Image: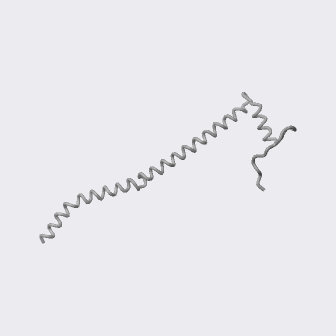
């Protein structure tokens, strides 16, 4: 009987630290591996970087297109740009000009 009482007394002394260590291990695991853990945070940071690079590329493309459009505005008409667009739309060339096709049509 005394032996069983000694085990109970020591179990009470050990139960608190064991519970504390278990809780710490649980939260430490989820800090690293959880849905909002360090690994998920790193993957999200990589996605944000890729999206920002894509946004920057789209912004650069938009600026280039806006520059080309500004050359065709009525207040500022660039004759070369007008000639280029007219030839592309009407599919016309001059008698002394050569046409070089860059995109090969697929059969």
- 51 horizontally vs 7: left or right: right
User: Quadrant of the image for the N terminus?
Assistant: bottom left
Residue 70 is situated, as x and y percent measured from the top left of the image, at: 69, 32
Residue 36 is situated, as x and y percent measured from the top left of the image, at: 42, 52
Which residue lies at the image location 84% right of the left edge and 39% below the top edge?
97
Which residue lies at the image location 51% right of the left edge and 46% below the top edge?
48
Look at the image and name its color scheme: one colour
Residue at the extreme left of the image, as rendered: 2
User: Quadrant of the image for the C terminus?
Assistant: bottom right
For residue 76, which quarter of the picture?
top right
Residue 53 is situated, as x and y percent measured from the top left of the image, at: 56, 44
Q: Is residue 7 above or below residue 44?
A: below
Which residue lies at the image location 58% right of the left edge and 45% below the top edge?
54
For residue 56, which quarter of the picture?
top right
Residue at the extreme right of the image, as rendered: 95
Residue 62 is situated, as x and y percent measured from the top left of the image, at: 63, 39
Q: Is residue 101 above or below residue 29?
A: above
For residue 9, which quarter of the picture?
bottom left
Give whichever of 19, 105 is nearer the camera.
105
Which residue lies at the image location 70% right of the left edge and 35% below the top edge?
69
- 100 horizontally vs 21: left or right: right
């Amino acid at each position: 009987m005394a032996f069983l009482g000694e085990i109970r007394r020591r179990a009470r002394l050990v139960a608190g630290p064991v519970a504390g260590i278990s809780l710490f291990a649980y939260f430490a695991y989820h800090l690293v591996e959880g849905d909002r853990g360090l690994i998920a945070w790193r993957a999200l940071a990589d996605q944000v970087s890729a999206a920002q690079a894509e946004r920057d590329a789209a912004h650069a493309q938009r600026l280039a297109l806006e520059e080309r459009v500004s050359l065709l505005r009525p207040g500022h008409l660039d004759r070369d740009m007008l000639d280029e667009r007219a030839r592309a739309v009407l599919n016309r060339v001059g008698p002394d000009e050569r046409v070089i096709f860059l995109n090969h049509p697929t059969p």
